[in-house]
Amino acid sequence: MLSMVRLFLFSTILVFFIQTTSQAQSASLARKYFSDGEFEKAASLYKELHERNRSNDYFFERYFLTLLELEDYKEAEKMMKKSIKAAPEKVERYVSFGTLYDRQGKREKANEQYEKAVKLLPSVQMQVVKLANTFIKNKSYKYAIATYEKGTKLLKIKNMFSYELGSVYRLKGDIPKMIESYLDCLEYMPNRMTNIQAFFQRELSKTDGFSELKKQLYIRINKFSEISIYSEMLIWVFVQQEEFENALRQSIALDKRQNENGSRIYRLAQTAIREKQYDSGIAAYTYIIKEKGIDCPYYIDSKRYVLAAKRDKLVEGYNYSKEELLELEEEYKGFLDEFGRSYNTAVIMREMAELEAFYLNDLDKAIAILDVVINMSRLSRISIAEAKIDLGDYYLMQGEVWESSLLYSQVDKEMKDAPLGEMARFKNAKLSYYKGDFEWAQDQLDVLKGSTSELISNDAINLSVFILEHYALDTSAQPMYMFAKADLLTFQNKFDEAVIVMDSVMIKFKDHGLGDDILMVKSEIAYKKRDYKLAVELLERIPEEFPEGILVDNAIFKMAELYELRLQDTQKAMELYEKILFDHPGSLFTVEARKRFRKLRGDGV
């Protein structure tokens, strides 16, 4: 008896295996016939496969498509009726039936089938999505929308398909309805925020859709003030459009309404500063300091970063007054009085020393601050090395070359294989260059060309190439000695003296190859003195007088920056960025020039 059961099972498995193998072979052959355009042969095989299993969607679809290719509409209609009768729960087949009528130009009959599909839709989530996707595939967006709306009523869950509806409206190109659906989704599924923002970023930047989005958000915020996610989305929109003042206003309102700890304001401040929107960033940090107080976890960092933001605003804007600098100095003193002068505040002390040295021109005060820093207990080796490099710079600005070299050498020895050690080594090499010891400078620069720091390596290569190109071009090395001296005077902020020396080089050695380099340095001095028109005039001379020189693309890019950021002449800036792209495609500035040109032209948000 047992052996008979085993024989029966074996026979059943064998038959199933043979049938499955035969079906797979037939399907493979039918697929080949279809791809080769032999639709009659494909139809014969697909018909057989479909009639064996009428519930199989793949064979149904392939047989139907084959009949459409053969324009055998009579057979297709016959097949369709049988298939629907065999699997009435597959309402998406009514869509195929409608497609058949559409193909024959029978639009009314097609719509009847589409409407029947929606009407017969069961209250099953998977079936709702499947039918809608069938309509979408058929580009029948109107009926895909009707399907999701009917599904929402059947399943009785508000906004259940709002995300999917947003996608359909997006495909349809109905921006207001797309926005409405995606905002509905946020209430139901707030975790979709990032995805929806990505859709908005991509789709709304092509149109004036952000205005529509803001309008709808304002309506919802007024109507549903308790739903915070709409305010969060509005803040995001303001940030995208760089309306940081509005973003901050909305963030403060949300912070107060939800009794938050200031984290939202703090993140916004960081973003604003990163985008160089200093006023909004400073206002955000100030709100945390004044409104949240010392118990706020972001209080100390806000006190610290508001100083950095105020400094950057003054420094990068080059529009500061002596009074503003003195006011900032007092704020640094206030911070140090509040939090003490220790290893915890060493970074602030370095920043204050930089303010004194470069902007208030009080080198003695800067040096005194850093002398305290490098002698602090518990200060890390890295912090000591950073302070010593700064201190070396300030001694060099003061003309104390020996003290400067000693500090650089100490850092080189203490941080030998670290980037800071290489930085100190480069500064010592440049010090040799300033003194006119070009051979010794070259020896040190040759070693630094292989630096692990790309910045130091590039700086070393550039200075080395500059020395090789201009030293001993003729019987006299005097022009290079004079230029190096002028370079040092520039570093020491002795701009008028530097210009006098460089002009002397141009007069005494007019045929020497330093002409374009002198114009470049003089333009940088004019920039630092906030004489932007003179800076442009000097830069313009480089491509005019030295068209084959290596500084031409550099000069054009710097001019474009000046027109964009200082002279507010967008059109002229665009022309110069475009000149880089067309006339100097191999320039190192090409990528940045393209990015800035597109931004000025208004590409994207």
Image (tube, grey):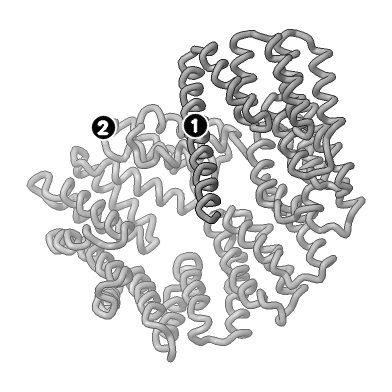
Q: Which residue is mark 2?
A: 548
Q: Residue 207, percent across and down? A: 69, 31
Residue 401 can be seen in this image: no
Describe the element under mark 2 as helix, strand or loop. loop
In three-dimensional space, the C-alpha distance between marks 2 and 1, rounded to whole angstroms, equals 71 Å
Residue 47 is drawn in which quadrant?
top right
**Amino acid identity at mark 2:** Glu
Q: Left or right: where does residue 461 sit relative to residue 1?
A: left
Q: Are marks 2 and 1 in contact (CB under 8 Å)?
A: no
User: Which of the two marks, 2 or 1, is nearer to us in this view?
Assistant: 1
Question: Does 274 appear above or below 543?
Answer: below
- Residue reaching furthest to the right: 223
| Residue sitting nearer the eye, 274 or 431 | 274
Q: Quadrant of the N terminus?
A: bottom right
Q: Amino acid at mark 1?
A: Ala
x 29%, y 45%: residue: 517
- The image position of residue 253, as x and y in percent, is 82, 61
Label for residue 24?
Answer: 1
Tell which residue pokes out farthest to the bottom in this image.
377
Residue 77 picture quarter: top right
User: Is residue 303 something that shows in the picture?
Assistant: yes
| Residue at 46%, 53% in the rendered image | 528
Q: Which quadrant holds residue 382?
A: bottom left
